[in-house]
Amino acid sequence: MDGAQEEVPEGVWDAISSRLDEAEGVAAGPVGIGTGAAGSAAGAAVQKGRTVRIWLRNAGVGMAAAAAVAVAVVFGFRQGGSSDPVSGGQAVAQVQEDSVEVIQVVEAEDDALIAVVPQEEAPAAEKVLARATTSTAVGTMTEARTEVGTETEAGTESRTETQVGTETETTTDTESEAGTETPVGTETETMTEIGTTVVAGNETRTEVMTTTDTETEVAGEISDWDDVFAEDEEAVSRRRGHRVSLTISGNALGGNDSRDADMVPGGPMYSQGQGFTNYIWEEHTIAYGIPISAGVGVKINFTDRFAMGIGIKYSLLTRTLEGIYYNNEGKAFEVQDIRNSQHYLGIPVNFYYSIIQGKHVDFYAYAGGTVERCLADKYLINSDSGTFNHDGSITGVQFSANAGIGVEFLATKWLGIYIDPSIGYYFDSPQPNSIRKTQPLMFGFEAGLRFRL
Amino acid sequence: MTVTPEQELVEKCQKGDKVAQKEVYDLLAPRMFPVCIRYVGDRAVAQDLLQDGFVTLFTHIDSFKGDGSFEGWARKIFVNTALMYLRKKDALKMTEDLETVRHLSWDGASQTENIGYQELMKLIMALPAGFRTIFNMYVIEGYSHREISQILGISEVTSRTQLSRARAWLQDKINEMTQNA
């Protein structure tokens, strides 16, 4: 009976061949035991679908966390702002609001000449129909043309017109009305030149030139959306002086999901006449621990925007599985509690591009990869017959690639706290079985400190 | 050192040679299929296990070091694949559902020589899963009771008891067949 043969049904080899091709094309795929060829394919499809759902869920959580952190940073600095359709120049800080005094114009009888006469005091009967407001930013000159119309009770309608050829130059009058409060430190300088020339009996030509310089120094906090994102020359200059940073980091990866994943066994070691020896036949992974990493490195700034980081990273992967343990003598032990821990050491290399460099915060994008090797593959086997220790064999190295966005909060001029969410992919490797084989696409969350040297 | 045809075939498979893989399949499948049938008692399920076993075999063929028979190494894979399936189906629990329990000695050679292989296979497949597994592992594969107890997570006493019950049941069935023949 040991040497008995049975005719194998048609189509078995085709199914085997396609599964082998699929296994070669996909980084990792557990070999599940189904109740039929369709069941096995459906099981693999379900496993892939589950992997995708797990990745999407973890990626969504990570992105939401990063977005929440970014929003908190931005809104934490914001103290409100104002928008003004009549303003110009680059807004760095909100300073003040000024009102333009109503300018009453008297239309001359001869419409060839138009006069603009600023009134120091508007007649009590006048009703202001419009008022233009101007927000003046720090260090800028605001230039705007404002046209207003007034209607007096007497029915006179006045308007301002500038005829081609006149040498009337009008700039926005930014005199503050009485009672207007200006922030501390505001200096407003207004120069008004008025010249009046009587040309003829009933013609009056008046030239008015008003210029205003307003400068306000706002000491303290940035209080506008633009403030956070605007380039800070001082900050950039400060960073130019620190080309190298020392980085200390910690990392946790998404993918901690207990599942009934059937691991592909690592393959038996057959020794003559004794079957398997010094080997664990993995039947079923019960749960994976969260992969965690810690490392140190340096970040070198090549330019104000581009930088490279390199370092050393230690990673710990754990899992609980059940299977059959064969000791050195080939004796088999059925075990439901096998604890596996894998210790990796790797060299991560990343390239950074600084998108926004603010005074207190940096936003950047980065991409890179890691090469690492498992240094120890330890198994603790808790069987009914006793507890055993087993070391797995290790060959080759593990390559991975990653990309993400990061934010660094500059606590002081030499210390920064950073958060780097990322997405990583672990390429197929001969390293021991782990979550990286069943879920090669993983979401990561790294945080750490950067010390500018 | 000359390389045997078997070693050469295995080396080609380790390099991913599809033609060599097909040759290995053609060589082993007719021998491994009955192994699967004996353990699970169902040809359709055995066909699936045959697929799973070969995928495992080719995926991890690099771990075959050439210290012993390749067929023996492959057989271990298929036996373990079948045991994993039975364990998942919770089919390895020992049952008491044999019609008769008699303590008779088993002389496999003399008592099976009067029936053909196919008839014997049918009888084995008709055994309850737990009895069938122990019968296969002890009588066919050559495991000891101690090894069976460790692999299946049962006591040695249970292994021996279940085996004797399986033997008694088979013996009754064989006697019926020979009397009716």
Image (spheres, helix red, strand yellow):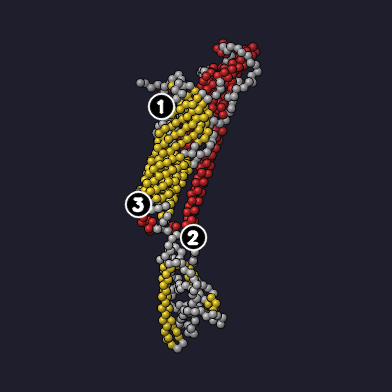
Q: Which mark is residue B11?
A: 1
Q: Is residue B168 left or right of residue A117?
A: right
Neighbourhood count class around disc 1 (C-alpha, 10 Å): few under 14, some 14–19, many 20 upward: some
Instruction: Write the residue at 53% across / 73% down.
Output: A130
**Is residue A373 shown left or right of residue A59?**
left
Question: Toward the viewer: A429 or A15?
Answer: A429
- In the image, what residue occupies the spot 53% across and 42% down? A53
Mark carried by residue A242: 3
Q: Quadrant of residue B46?
A: top right
Disc 2 chain ID: A
The reply to the same-chain question for discs 2 and 1 is no
Q: Secondary structure at mark 2?
A: loop
Q: What residue does disc 2 label?
A: A79
The image shows residue A80 at horizontal and vertical percentages of: 50, 61
Q: Mark 3 is on which residue type?
A: His
Q: Is residue A176 visible?
A: yes
Which amino acid, mark 2? Gln
**Subunit under mark 1:** B
Q: Residues within 10 Å of mark 3 (few under 14, many from 20)?
A: some
Whole-percent x and y of residue B146? 52, 19
Q: Residue furthest toward the top? A: B110
Q: Amino acid at mark 1?
A: Glu
Looking at the rendered structure, the secondary structure element under dot 1 is helix
Q: Nearer the viewer, residue B143 or B123?
A: B143
- Indicate whether A249 appears above or below B19: below
Looking at the picture, does residue B65 appear above or below residue A215?
above
CA separation in Å, label 3 and label 1 = 57 Å
The quarter of the picture where residue A201 lies is: bottom left
Q: Are marks 3 and 2 on the same chain?
A: yes
